[in-house]
Amino acid sequence: MISSSRFMSLTLRNKIQVLYREGTFVVAIRYYNYKINLYLLHGYYVEVFYNHKDDRIEKINLLESSHSRMKFYMDQISLPEDLL
């Protein structure tokens, strides 16, 4: 099991590998120029920002529960309160 701080210290390539092996896809949203895939990884949420125009993953970040994007996710699915 990898902690959120350890996960964030990984390279982009290694983050992708960990998410592929250990993460669970939750939902995808459109946000400005991105398709953002939300994953659950060991009790914390991770966002993967995919840029369609450039056909690449630009960044992978932890989802902060206070971020305004939470509304977009909450409109799509019910996220468990204990994981927010």
Image (spheres, rainbow, N blue to C red):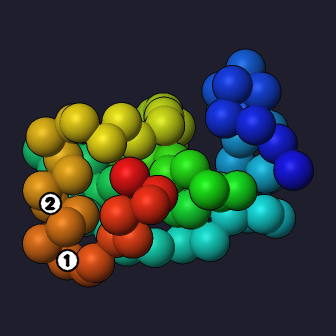
Secondary structure at badge 2 equals: helix
Q: Which mark is residue 76?
A: 1
From this viewpoint, is residue 54 visible? no
Pick whichever, 41 or 28, lies toward us.
41
Q: Residue furthest front?
A: 82
In this rendering, the answer to whether 28 lies above or below 70 is below
Identity of the amino acid at label 1?
Gln
Q: Considering the numbered disc 1 on the image, is that residue within a helix, a strand or a loop?
A: helix
Is label 2 in contact with label 1 (beta carbons under 8 Å)? yes
Report whether 36 appears left or right of 40: left
Residue 83 x/y as whole percent? 46, 58
Q: Position of residue 49 (x, y in %)?
A: 40, 45
Give the vertical position of 13 relative to 8 (above or below): below
Q: Residue type at mark 2? A: Phe
Q: Position of residue 23 (x, y in %)?
A: 68, 64
Residue that badge 2 annotates: 72
